[in-house]
Structures are given as C-alpha cells and as structure tokens.
C-alpha cells in the first residue's frame, strides 16, 4: 500500500492511504473538497524501506473554506 503525503492547504502534513497512484487527489474537507496534485516520484519503493510515499501539493478547494463557521 502506498501513502500520500499532503503539503499545503488545510490538510498540510496529513498522510493518507493511497490506492492507485493518480496525478490528482480530491479529498473531502468539511463541507467541500480540496484538490491536491502529485509532484515528484514515489519514495521508498524498495521491498525493505517501508511503505511507498508520494508527495501531493495543494492546488484548490472546490468551494470557499471557512474554518470558523461558528
């Protein structure tokens, strides 16, 4: 299983399971979705160096993000 490491945006620093490595991830966030794009090559692709990691960088949110809707 591969892992997606998210950079920037509201999910900065999160690591999520990655089924099929695609160039774009659309991830649910609050009441909207955020879009991350892949950058670089997968890391840790050997059999003895842990799970494969792929870096994804924040691109956009599909709606405005309001972190304090109280």
Image (spheres, rainbow, N blue to C red):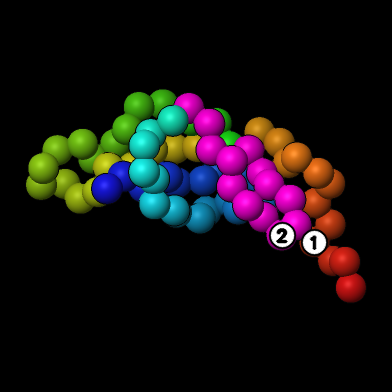
Residue that appears at 67% across and 55% down: 29
Look at the image and tell me in which quarter the C terminus lies: bottom right
Q: Magenta stretch containing residue 19, yes or no?
A: no
Q: Is residue 49 visible?
A: yes
First in sequence: mark 1 or mark 2?
Answer: 2
Q: Magenta stretch containing residue 34, yes or no?
A: yes
Q: Are marks 1 and 2 in contact (CB under 8 Å)?
A: yes
- Which segment did they paint magenta? 23-35
Crowd class of label 2 (few under 14; some 14 to 19; many from 20; radius 10 Å) = few
Q: Is residue 57 visible?
A: no
Q: Could you tell whether 54 is left or right of 9 in the image? A: left
Residue that appears at 36% across and 37% down: 20
Q: Could you tell whether 49 is left or right of 28 in the image? A: left
**Residue 23, percent across and down?**
48, 27
**Residue 13, percent across and down?**
52, 53
Residues at marks 1 and 2, CA–CA distance in whole angstroms: 9 Å
Residue 6's place in the image compared with 22, above or below, is below
Q: Quick one: SS at disc 2? A: loop
Q: Which residue is mark 1?
A: 67
**Residue 22, percent across and down?**
44, 30
Crowd class of label 1 (few under 14; some 14 to 19; many from 20; radius 10 Å) = few
Q: Determine the residue located farthest toward the left in the rendered image.
A: 48
- Of the two numbered discs 1 and 2 in the rendering, the one whose residue sits closer to the viewer: 2
Q: Quick one: SS at disc 1? A: loop
Task: Determine the image quadrant of residue 60.
Answer: top right
Residue that appears at 74% across and 50% down: 32
Q: Main secondary structure of the magenta part?
A: strand
**Residue 39, percent across and down?**
47, 28
């Amino acid at each position: 299983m591969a892992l997606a490491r998210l950079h920037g945006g509201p999910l900065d620093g999160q690591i999520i399971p990655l089924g099929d490595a695609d160039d774009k991830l659309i991830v649910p966030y609050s009441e909207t979705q955020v879009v991350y794009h892949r950058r670089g090559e997968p890391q840790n692709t050997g059999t003895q160096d842990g799970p494969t990691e792929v870096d994804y960088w924040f691109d956009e949110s599909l709606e405005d993000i309001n972190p304090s809707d109280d």
